[in-house]
Amino acid sequence: MRIGKQPESLKADVTLLLEGTYPFIRGGVSSWVHQIITGLPEYTFSLVFLGGDPSHYGPQQYELPDNVVHLECHYIMDVRNERKPRPRKGNRAAFQDQRALHDQFRKGEAVPANLLHDVFGQLGVRGGITRDDFLYSEESWSMIDESYRKFCTEPSFVDYFWTIRIMHAPLFQLAEIARTLPKTGMVHAISTGYAGLLGAMVSQQRNVPFALSEHGIYTKERKIDLSQADWIQDPSDLVSANINDQLGYIRQLWIRFFEALGRLAYQQAEPIVSLYQGNRERQLADGAEQNRTRIIPNGIDPVKFEAARSARPEGIPRVLGLVGRVVPIKDIKTFIRSMRSVCEVIPDAEGWIVGPEEEDPTYVAECKELVQSLELEGRVRFLGFQNVNDILPQLGLMVLTSISEALPLVILEAHAAGLPCLATDVGACRELLEGMSEEDCALGASGSIVPIADPEATAREAIRLLLDEDLWHRAQQAGLERVQRYYTLESMFGAYRDIYTTGLDAQQGAS
């Protein structure tokens, strides 16, 4: 689906490639995208939204700024247009290029530019490998059969066959999107995965600059999701001390697939942006070239939170807030369990879960059942999506129990509103609460760091912060000063302005 001007009459400065985020899903990444667009009004933006099944997405959550000239939406797991199969031979040379590509993946080596050019150019076109060729041709069957016999260690051929089909079918839609994308000065993907692969395709085929920003490390987050996914069945006899050996072949195959997509994106993108040093090191370990990487922290406008600071009551509210989507990666259940211990010490304490609940209804139901089973009704409240500026003055402590984060905006917002934070030791949380440089660390701690999935440690630190007023006020001051010195929108906008100017100047010079 395309919304906006016709592609042939349109040229945007920057095309943003957005997988499962803006403008249909609220959250930290979507807020950041909206900030970039509105904060850089001198550029025009075209948006490409990639989703899974269309039933997973509701109405548009953001009003598009005036400098967005085009929006198109694609649902790459929508298979309702399946056609009746017809026998076909398939292009042997094109499938040989696919074998060579997969050999490079197995070796962990960069794909030669000429091979990448051929593979991307052949994908989805007659004379190359069409979607029907992949699904129904003799050459495709031969390649799948050959790979199964040579590499597969465990599942039945039927399971392997259908996994390969489901895994690769979206790539043909991506190739079509890349060919029909409106004219653009450069592309900017906000993750690896399918969005990053699309960026690599567009960059390689059209010779336009490709920037990549990662808030979280996509391959790491997909590995977490896939390790827990109940739609993948593992053999019942897997026993090993090594976590990777405990994952079945199909589960590992999916993980390797997304790792390969990440390497292709890293190979084509420059710059490759991360939010903090820990993620940059992960990018390097996953195949990014060091000279292409750079760190640009998220930023906020502290002035916008002055009203929230002024609205704070004199005392410390006995309210713990978790602001985020109600999904497993945020580990809402640990927050709920910690509230049981908090309420035993502070009987009037409350826990507020503030965020959208539409993404994973099953998990939401489990969380609400946990509240009931722990007899926390009236103590733990689900408030849904709220204006964060209205919520922050009412909280005494911001809590993040996530099992994975990048550089969470909610911590920056809490600090700007005069609110200490408690967070798990993931992503940049330790840097945000304890400092990243000697000068930064000298400001003091702006909260506490706790282990992942440890409700007792979470409760213990929450109680300590809430009951020690001197400690709480020192943390409040440290957080406010840290944000004002190191995490402003002005510095973030300047860094991305430099990226866009460099990319667009290079493209103009090449043309």
Image: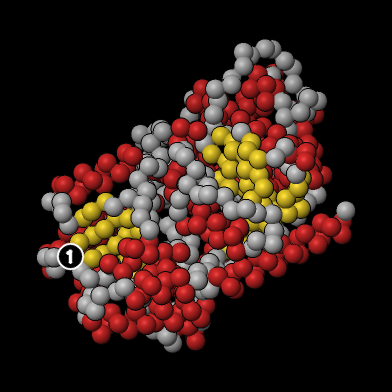
- 383 and 187: which one is in front? 383
Outermost residue, front side: 66
Q: Position of residue 398 (x, y in %)?
A: 32, 66
Give residue 416's quadrant in the image.
Answer: bottom left
- 60 and 351: which one is in front? 60
> In the visual, does 445 lie left or right of 36?
left
Residue 178 in sight: no
Q: Quadrant of the N terminus?
A: top right
Assign a secondary structure to mark 1: loop
Residue 82 in sight: yes
Q: Position of residue 380 (x, y in %)?
A: 21, 55
When the figure is inspected, residue 461 is found, relative to residue 62, above or below; the finding is: below
Q: Position of residue 495 (x, y in %)?
A: 65, 69
- 331 and 304: which one is in front? 304
> In the visual, does 248 lie left or right of 80?
left
> In the visual, does 460 lie left or right of 258?
left
**Callout 1, which amino acid?**
Ala
Residue that badge 1 annotates? 349
Give residue 348's quadrant in the image.
Answer: bottom left
Q: Residue at x 57, y 50 (%)?
A: 64
Q: Residue at x 51, y 81 (%)?
A: 485
